[in-house]
Amino acid sequence: MAETRKVIDCRRFPAEKPCSIAISGTEEEVVSLAALHASTVHGHPDSPELRKQLRSMLEDDATAGKAA
């Protein structure tokens, strides 16, 4: 898979309910799972605006390519 893995870490964002979830994978995987997480755990409506905001929070996964 040549695509750069992306990551979003819920600990970096203020929330009423503290959270330690980090999601990594392809951009589309991360955005989809982060939207599901944001709606089910944090009560945010899953909307195009939420997905746009999540996409802007993505970072390259610094651990990508390292052996597990």
Image (cartoon, rainbow, N blue to C red):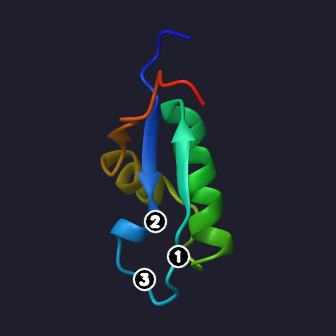
Report, in whole angstroms, how far the alpha carbon at label 3 lies from the one at label 2: 9 Å
Residue identifier under label 1? 19
**Dot placed on the residue nearer the N-terminal end, 3 or 2:** 2
Residue 10: mark in rendering: 2
- Residue type of the residue flagged with mark 2: Cys
Task: Judge whether 5 appears above or below 48 on screen.
Answer: above
**Dot placed on the residue nearer the N-terminal end, 2 or 1:** 2
Quadrant where the N terminus is found in the figure: top right
Which residue: 53% across, 29% down?
26
Quadrant where the C terminus is found in the figure: top right
Q: Quick one: 65 or 1, which is closer to the camera?
A: 65
Which residue: 62% across, 69% down?
39
Residue 15: mark in rendering: 3
- Mark 2 and 1 residues: CB-CB less than 8 Å, in contact? yes
Q: Secondary structure at mark 2?
A: helix
- Mark 1 and 3 residues: CB-CB less than 8 Å, in contact? yes
